[in-house]
Amino acid sequence: MSQFEFTHRRKNPLTGNWVLVSPHRNNRPWLGATEKSAPSNLPEHDETCPLCPGNQRANDTQNPQYDNTFVFTNDFGALTPQVAAQAAQLETNPLFAIEAATGECRVICFSPKHNKTLPELSVNEIKDVVDTWKQNYVELSAQYACVHIFENKGAVMGCSQPHPHGQVWAHNHLSTEIQLEQASQLQYQQTHGSNLLADYVKHERVDGERVVYQNDHWLVVVPFWAAWPFETLLVSKDDVRHFGQLTEAQSTALADAIKVLTTRYDNVFNCCFPYSMGWHCAPSDLDDDSHWRMHAHFYPPLLRSATVKKHMVGYEMLAESQRDLSPETAAKILKNASDVHYTEGNQHD
Ligand code: H2U
Ligand code: ZN
């Protein structure tokens, strides 16, 4: 029995947000909504998919016959580089705070194969994805302070196409999450004289209860403060602050960690496990970014099965996040899931 089997709150040191943990609620009956499982019989090439090689996208653009990854400017980008003429005369009243936002949005196809997902790619193919992330980060961070690289996987997470892909949004303002993490990591370093995530990694490696996987350069944990049932933090064990600093060895080890983590996710419920994941890197306009450590958050919505998701509603919307399954139990489930993908004929153990 874990020492945490009582109702309590935990604080996320990166954002300052609290989460209420109520392990005893995990056995309550569920008659609520169930989600549809993702279709499993997709073709390798889909004539109607705007991300497949050679196909037509919006705006009459044709994709090349690409072989590994393929990057294009989002045809419906939320941010564009042009400054609007109206931006010159914006309201200054604090109750009506407003500022112009400019930037660039790109789509990254992870593979030419329409029916593959990250765990179904080889470590070498995932390494191509990591290299593409790095290349886009380096290019965009020379122009923009804040570069967000992320993946929405599964229709339940708002992913619009099954074709394996992620996105990049780059802009000069700091997003709310990056602003929070920037302030927390800086304050921690000023108070304790050390790096917040470096200290956290050190503690988790000693404790081990929440560690899901580790290799030479990366640690995967269900963070102590996880809000989503199977949330994980993928964090560098080294003093790496952003993608631009990744060495070949760190990139290859990252591909390995992603392969293992996403395979285990799929094996928990023998399904294509949906999630939103994304990278948090130091803003590129800092003189000193020594308080930062590069990491990714994985936020999967599933709770009890492939079709029962955690709803962040009611108390979560009006008060703070709440979870039933303890982070320690979730870590144990992920640690024990098989490293062989369930589609390769292996049932999870
Ligand atoms: P999501 O599945 O995470 O929504 O990402 C797919 C993106 O692909 C989405 O942002 C873009 C959408 O705007 N897209 C194009 O740029 N061109 C297209 O022809 C289809 C989709
Ligand atoms: Zn496709």
Image: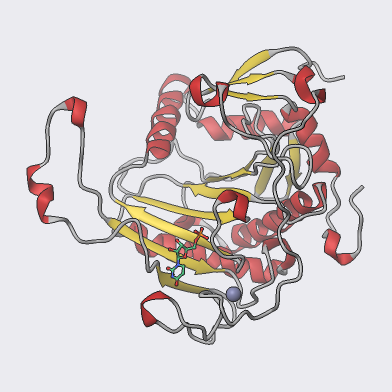
The spot of residue 98 in percent (x, y) is 20, 38
Q: Is residue 110 above or below residue 194?
A: below
Left/right placement of residue 249 relative to residue 317 reads right
| Residue at 51%, 83% in the rendered image | 55
The spot of residue 182 in percent (x, y) is 40, 34
Left/right placement of residue 114 relative to residue 346 reads left
The spot of residue 47 in percent (x, y) is 59, 82
Q: Quadrant of the N terminus?
A: top right
Q: In the rendered view, how is the structure colored?
A: secondary structure
Q: Quadrant of residue 110?
A: bottom right
Left/right placement of residue 301 relative to residue 109 reads right
The spot of residue 215 in percent (x, y) is 72, 50
Q: Residue furthest left?
A: 89
Q: Quadrant of residue 74?
A: bottom left
| Residue at 65%, 38% in the rendered image | 231
- Ligand 2: which quarter? bottom right
Counting the numbered discs, the total is 0
Q: Is residue 257 above or below residue 125?
A: above
Residue closest to the eye, 202 or 223: 223
Residue closest to the eye, 9 or 46: 46
Q: Is residue 18 above or below residue 256?
A: above
